Image: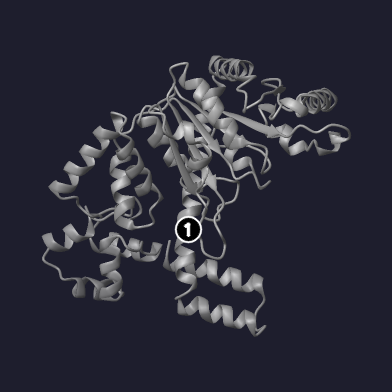
Amino acid sequence: MKLKEYLKLNKISNKEFSKLIGITPVSLSRYISGERIPEKEIVLKIFEFTHGSVSPDDFYFQKKNTQEFDSDQLILINQMSKQLKNGSKKALAKTITLVESKLKKDKLLVQKIFEKFKVNNNTVRIGITGVPGVGKSTFIESLGLFLIQKSHKVAVLAIDPSSKESGGSILGDKTRMEKLSINPLAFIRPSPSDGHLGGVAKKTHESILCLEEAGYDIIFVETMGVGQAETAVYDMVDIFLVLLLPSGGDELQGIKKGIIELADLIIVNKADNDLKKAAEITQREYRNAIQITGKPRKDHEIDVLMCSSLKSEGFNEIWDFVLNFVNKQKKNKKFYENRESQKTKWMWNSVSNNVNEIISNEIVRNKFILKIKEKVKNKNINIFQASELIIDYFIKNKF
């Protein structure tokens, strides 16, 4: 039984009950609304005073979205869910906008919409990274159009870096993929990274689920390509492609162990015209390097292929590799294990994002934290002591 129900049933006011357990009426109101979870000692007191009617589970496992949806909102949610399922681009764009929103009311709507989603393991999630100028957008557009000809529906999540100063981003990938963006079987969504490491946006996982619900079976996740922790991308896709520029000579030193460990397939792009020979040299050097370093993973062999995105050459070989890779992963159950593992990682990522959001909001206005900052500035305490004090404060008062 919820505490609110217990008090109403027994005709006990908030003021009376708060006095019984030794807290303020304001704190009790926050516990009842779910705005704050009481400390262990308070929970046990409530359990004791209510003779077990209100158990600890009623606090620790209560749904935070206690807000009830009215009939109009429920109709809207059902309409959006139905339109999304039918492949409406407008509903899809609106849902992803809600996903990216930081407003509490939007988050509640998203949770309700996501309740209607079903697991879809018939899609292929492809992560693509590479240094700026390697031609990621041109590659995705050409490969996307190639796949549409094979009766696939293609979606692109293109992540743009956010400015640290303004928080804004260029979001120009639609202009770089003109042909793909106007194709009725394609959907391109540029999203700001919002300062998130790993070359992906905070809500990339949720956006992927929205795209799958809307019927897109091939989903590209294009990273910023700035050399940050690409592990974040690897942990949310089924296959990870690394694009390279053609370059001859002593490029063997450019073979980074990290890239080899993460890549499922290495592709030398721009293998055309004057760069064709340099591309062949790069392909040969990387293949040799893989042979020298040994297989990075036991479950499959990495290959190095070439393509020309401008001339749409080499895509048959690339797609054959992707299909063989995914089919092999499904056959040995690795595909399904990876997706289950990714769910757990995404859950913790969501927890981390929410905690960071709470902390960020408190840093600028919380009197206790401002005092700690002042003490560090005046060298009254060191940063390690300050960190412990702030963590302790959040554990006791916020989580």
SS type, badge 1: helix
Q: In which quarter of the image is residue 314?
A: top right
Which residue matches tag 1? 355
Q: As shown in the figure, which amino acid type bears the numbered disc 1?
A: Val
Q: Tell me if residue 393 can be seen.
A: yes
Q: In which quarter of the image is residue 212?
A: top left
**Residue 54 locus on image (x, y percent):** 25, 56
The residue at 62%/23% (across/down) is 311
User: Image height check: is 328 above or below 121?
Assistant: above
The residue at 59%/69% (across/down) is 388
Q: Alpha-carbon neighbours of circle 1 within 10 Å: few (<14), some, or many (≥20)?
A: some
Residue found farthest to the front: 273
User: Image height check: is 23 above or below 343?
Assistant: below
- Please state which of residues 397 and 313 is positioned toward the viewer in this rendering: 313
Left or right: 198, with 396 as reference point: right
**Residue 305 locus on image (x, y percent):** 70, 22
**Residue 201 locus on image (x, y percent):** 51, 47
